Image (tube, helix red, strand yellow):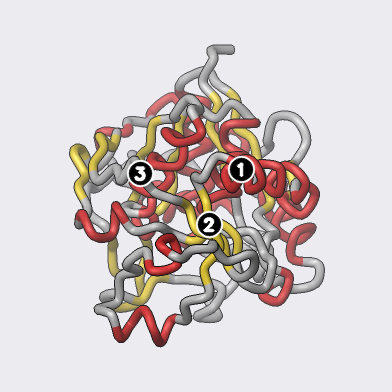
Amino acid sequence: MTSYIGRFAPSPSGPLHFGSLIAALASYLRAHSQQGQWIVRMEDLDPPREVAGASDDILTTLDAYGLHWHGSVMYQSQRHQAYQDCIEQLLAQNKGYFCQCTRKQIHACGGTYNGHCKQLTPPLSQGAIRLNNLSAIDQYNDVIMGHVTTEKDFASEDFIIKRRDNLFAYQLAVVLDDATQGVTEVIRGSDLLTSTCRQLSLYNILKLPTPQWGHIPVASIESGFKLSKQNHAPAIDINRPQASIQAALAFLGQPEVDIDHIQVMLTQAIAQFDINKIPKQTEILI
């Protein structure tokens, strides 16, 4: 084993579909090609969007596809105290603040939050909580896509880290969880390409070691519409994993493997894996 730790972090809002399989397989192959560990985290932060039984179904599907993880599965729903402790630390250090601005108000100001509530005296004591984003990182090097930049207004925005409804925001949870689990590299879909800048800003503010990132194309049914649980993408076939694995390898630009027992196929795929062959584009129509 090397010190490499990669991860796959699905949300339990439905069964695994082909787009999810691509992300899982890419991160799995990358981790194993580096003789590293591959861990699974369940991003169950948003109960209203969750589907009953989806967490167990996802894990059963990964197991049927031979995508076995190291260690135990982390559940974000069991991490609320760690997130709240971080929020309180940021508030105490004036690195976070309450905000009551609505989406309608922000849209009327041009669509980017302008820091209105940060200037209030005395400060608000309720509402959503925003990061005082003094880092405003707007670029990074991606191991697949190369140099990535995003708009400075997006990068410098004071983004929400705890929602008005008291649910913790993805940007906060993903940074704390990856840091806690020692993740050294994140391979995931390109729909999160620019969000990485916000996560980098939070890593910097919290003085946490940052992982590397690599973003793969997302599978889309038409331009701008990726396969997703929200779009009711069909579940992958748990009884015929070989065909789906072969299709996912082709999507990722990897060589075919011999149709065999699923574990034999994955062993061959690991040996042949080349991250440089992954298409350098944000989406691929299927």
- The structure residue drawn at horizontal position 42% and vertical position 33%, both measured from the top left corner, is 204
Q: CA distance from mark 1 to mark 3?
A: 16 Å
User: Which residue type does callout 2 highlight?
Assistant: Tyr
How dense is the environment of label 3, judged by Cα within 10 Å: few (below 14), some, or many (20 and up)?
A: some
- The structure residue drawn at horizontal position 68% and vertical position 37%, both measured from the top left corner, is 68
On the rendered structure, is 268 left or right of 177?
left
* Element type where label 2 sits in the image: strand
- The structure residue drawn at horizontal position 71% and vertical position 50%, both measured from the top left corner, is 76
**Count of marks overlaid on the render:** 3
Mark toward the start of the polypeptide (2 vs 3): 2
Above or below, 19 against 135 in this view is: below
User: Which residue type does callout 3 highlight?
Assistant: Leu
For label 1, the residue is: 92
Say the numbered circle drawn on residue 134.
3
* Element type where label 1 sits in the image: helix
Q: CA distance from mark 2 to mark 1?
A: 9 Å
For label 2, the residue is: 97
